Amino acid sequence: MPTSKPPATFISDLRPSRMATIEATVERLEEIREIETRDGTPKRVRNGRLKDGTGEIALVLWGSEVDLVQEGDRIRITEGWVKDYQGRPQISLGRSGKLEKRPAQE
């Protein structure tokens, strides 16, 4: 039996407090920085921007995720978590999300 893929959502359709599956290009990545978590342990974080044909959204990568992508990569985020941060939507992998690199579009 073939496995089915969850339907992809366009960036323009993303809404806070929902899971989403998107395919987009990593438009920009900021420097990796280290922050202190609530329990006092350090954790790496990296912000960036994703873009598709309908718009852009902020991307936040945590821990080992920061090394998974480079600018220009086409990626698919499955079950990513969309939230509102300072009045703007952003997507991260959250607790159950997965990130995979995709072939570049022709």
Image (spheres, grey):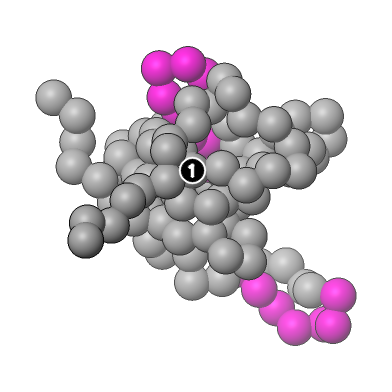
Main SS, magenta region, reads: strand
Q: Position of residue 36 (x, y in %)?
A: 77, 73
Residue for point 42% across, 24% down: 52
Residue sitting nearer the eye, 67 or 84: 84
Q: Residue furthest front?
A: 1
With respect to residue 89, does 95 lie above or below? below
Which quarter of the image is occupied by the C terminus? Answer: top left
| Residue appearing at x 38%, y 61% in the figure | 68
Q: Which residues are magenta?
A: 38-56
Identify the element where label 1 is drawn: strand
Which amino acid does the dot numbered 1 rest on? Answer: Thr
User: Could you tell whether 35 is left or right of 61 in the image?
Assistant: right
Reading the image, the residue beneath label 1 is 21
- Percent position (x, y) of residue 1? 21, 61
| Residue placed most toward the observer, 104 or 10 | 10
Question: Image check: 66 left or right of 36?
Answer: left
Q: Is residue 100 left or right of residue 84?
A: left
Residue at horizontal 62 percent and vertical 30 percent from the top: 14
Residue 61: x %, y % from top left:
56, 57
Q: Nearer the viewer, residue 21 or 36?
A: 21
Percent position of residue 86, x then y = 83, 35
